[in-house]
Amino acid sequence: DGGGGGGEVGGGDAAAALAEREALIDELRGREEEARRRESEAKRRALDKIGALGEESAVLREEAAELRRRLQEAEAVAAERGEVVAALEGRLEASDAASSPEVAALEAERAAAAEAARQAAAAAEAAAAAAA
């Protein structure tokens, strides 16, 4: 009889060990499931972030293209203005060159008039001296 009771105790130990083993297996499965859930969540967040970065990158590419277009327009306007300024400078130089003979003629005429006035003044002084 005592031997039979001992067998039940041994069987009870085995049942307890089996129950503990199943509890550990359940715990490991739970941890594994939690780890998979966290991994899945991390992957989803990473994919969301990649998607957001892709969208942001696309927006930045569009903005860069727009800025390049504006720069090209500004360069074209600057080139046109440069051509206009160069043309105006050329016309001004041509005008100066054309007016130079006229200016020289006016200067000569003014110098001749000044010389005639000096001669008239000298003649008037000489006449006044002779009359005195």
Image: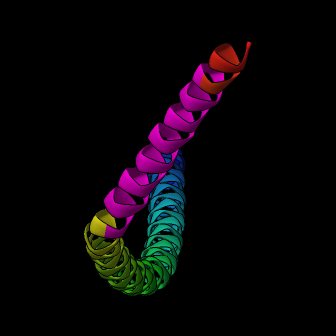
Q: Residue most toward the right?
A: 132
Q: Is residue 3 visible?
A: no
- Residue occupying the point 53% across, 32% down: 118
How is this picture coloured? rainbow
Q: Main secondary structure of the magenta part?
A: helix
Image x and y of residue 83, in percent: 29, 80
Q: Is residue 98 visible?
A: yes
| Magenta region includes residue 51 | no
Q: Is residue 63 left or right of residue 88?
A: right
Image x and y of residue 91, in percent: 32, 79
Front residue (pair 25, 106): 106
Image x and y of residue 65, in percent: 37, 85
- Residue occupying the point 52% across, 66% down: 38
Does residue 127 sit above or below 73 in this rendering? above
Range of the magenta residues?
102-126
| Magenta region includes residue 119 | yes
Q: What is the tally of numbered marks visible in this picture?
A: 0
Q: Is residue 131 left or right of residue 92?
A: right
Question: Quadrant of residue 132 in the image?
Answer: top right
Front residue (pair 84, 123): 123
Does residue 60 sit above or below 23 in this rendering? below
- Residue occupying the point 66% across, 14% down: 129
Front residue (pair 56, 104): 104
- Residue occupying the point 32% across, 57% down: 104
Front residue (pair 5, 132): 132
Image x and y of residue 88, in percent: 37, 77
